[in-house]
Amino acid sequence: MNEPKAPEPPARCLVDLKDGQAGVIRKNADRKSAEMGLYAGAQVVMFRNRKSELSVVIGAGEARFLVSRAIAKKVEIE
């Protein structure tokens, strides 16, 4: 018998991570950042996320990225 599926939690994006939190990219709507290494399945860690700054600093593997908030809002994480 089919049991009803629990609704998926709302999609979070990179800007929702706090300093030190990690996530896995579910979807990236920005082609340029995906080509740089922020592709679906990549594990990321937030290093610096300050509301007063225009960019966030994240890590993916050994690389560190300075990503604008506009682009970070396009990157869904789980």
Image (tube, grey):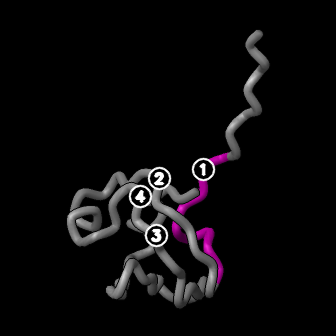
- Residue 40 image point, x, y percent: 38, 55
Tag 1 and tag 3, C-beta contact below 8 Å: no
The reply to whether callout 2 and callout 3 are in contact (CB within 8 Å) is no
Q: Position of residue 47 (x, y in %)?
A: 53, 89
| Residue at mark 2 | 26
* Residue 74 location, quadrant: bottom left
The answer to whether 54 appears left or right of 30 in the picture is right
- Structural distance between the alpha carbons of marks 4 and 3: 6 Å
The residue to which callout 3 is attached is 43
Q: Amino acid at mark 3?
A: Gln
Query: Is tag 4's residue or tag 1's residue first in the polypeptide sequence?
Result: 1
Question: In this orientation, does residue 55 appear?
Answer: no
Q: Secondary structure at mark 1?
A: loop
Q: CA distance from mark 2 to mark 3?
A: 10 Å
Q: Residue at x 28, y 67 (%)?
A: 33
Q: Are marks 2 and 1 in contact (CB under 8 Å)?
A: yes
In the image, the segment drawn in magenta is: 10-18
Secondary element under disc 4, as helix, strand or loop, is: loop
In the image, what residue type sits under mark 4? Gly
Instruction: Look at label 1 and name its amino acid.
Output: Ala
Q: Examine the rendered structure and indicate whether residue 50 appears above or below residue 9.
A: below
- The 10 Å Cα crowd at callout 3, few under 14, some 14 to 19, many 20 or more, is some
Q: Which numbered disc, 2 or 3, marks the residue that appears first in the sequence?
A: 2
Residue density around tag 4, few if under 14, some if 14–19, many if 20 or more, within 10 Å: some
Q: Residue at x 58, y 75 (%)?
A: 22
Q: CA distance from mark 1 to mark 3?
A: 16 Å
Image quadrant holding the N terminus, namely top right
